[in-house]
Amino acid sequence: MLKLFYSPGACSLASHVALEEAGADYEALAVDLKAGEQNRPEYREVNPKGRVPALVTERGVLTESPVILGYIAQTHPEAKLAPNDDSFAFGDMQAFNLFLATNVHVAYGHAFRPERYAKGEAGIAAVKAKVPEALDEHFAQIEERFADGRPFVHGDAYTVSDPYLMVFARWLDRPGMGDISRYPKLRAHRERIEARDATRKVLAAEGLS
């Protein structure tokens, strides 16, 4: 059985949804980040980075959302969560997921943990002030991706990119992040993914519905 370590509403939500979509045999174990459980020795043995998600498999532990999402898709091919038979299309999917991880997530990080990027009140304030601008740049690119009317990130087929994008679209609800109404196609995509049975089940399980 797979074991997913997650924190409610964190980026691990995407992996949680993907496991449910895949029909995987898994156990979801919550890590209370606010209580500092990610820094306790027992969790550091699972993931020395002290982050979520972490996925325990029969061969070892995987970390980082794009990796875990790709693994779930490849090990559950019957769920068709990725274009596993097309190397270029699979690479394109991973490129999008890495864009989310290295650009969108990092932009949010400047708001959530500005002390990682600056010192002093003035520096921290300056870092946080840039967040809406950075997010707008990234989400404007994503909004354009949906200009052709596609229902999902990569076209007509649902992939693991879709719950991953949904997570970051949900974070726009937090104060000072931006306004999702500026991106109607992104908002429609988020609502579409949130309405799926697997997503609804996971949101309820994480106490987010």
Image (cartoon, helix red, strand yellow):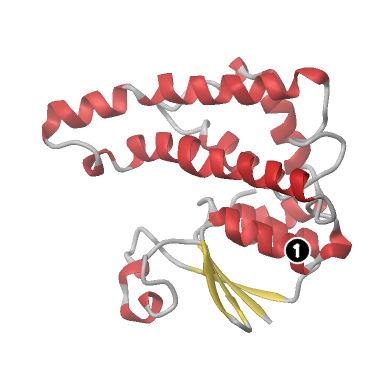
- Residue placed under numbered mark 1 in the picture: 74
Q: Residue at x 59, y 34 (%)?
A: 169
Q: Residue furthest front?
A: 88
* Figure check: 62 above or below 116: below
Q: Is residue 207 visible?
A: no
User: Is residue 200 among what the camera can see?
Assistant: yes
Residue 27, x across and y down, in percent:
64, 75
The picture places residue 46, in percent across and down from the top left corner, at: 44, 77
Q: Residue at x 52, y 32 (%)?
A: 173
Q: Name the residue at 83% across, 22% down.
A: 149
Residue at position x 27%, y 38% from top?
114
Q: At label 1, which amino acid type do we have?
A: Gln
Residue 117: name its quadrant. Answer: top left
What kind of element bears circle 1?
helix
Q: Is residue 121 left or right of residue 162?
A: left
Q: Give left or right: position of 171 versus 203.
A: left
Relative to 135, is 15 above or below? below
Q: Is residue 75 above or below residue 15?
A: below
Q: Is the N terminus in the top left, top right, bottom left or bottom right quadrant?
A: bottom right
**Residue 159: image x %, image y %?**
77, 47
Other residues around mark 1 within 10 Å, as few (<14) / some (14–19) / many (≥20): some
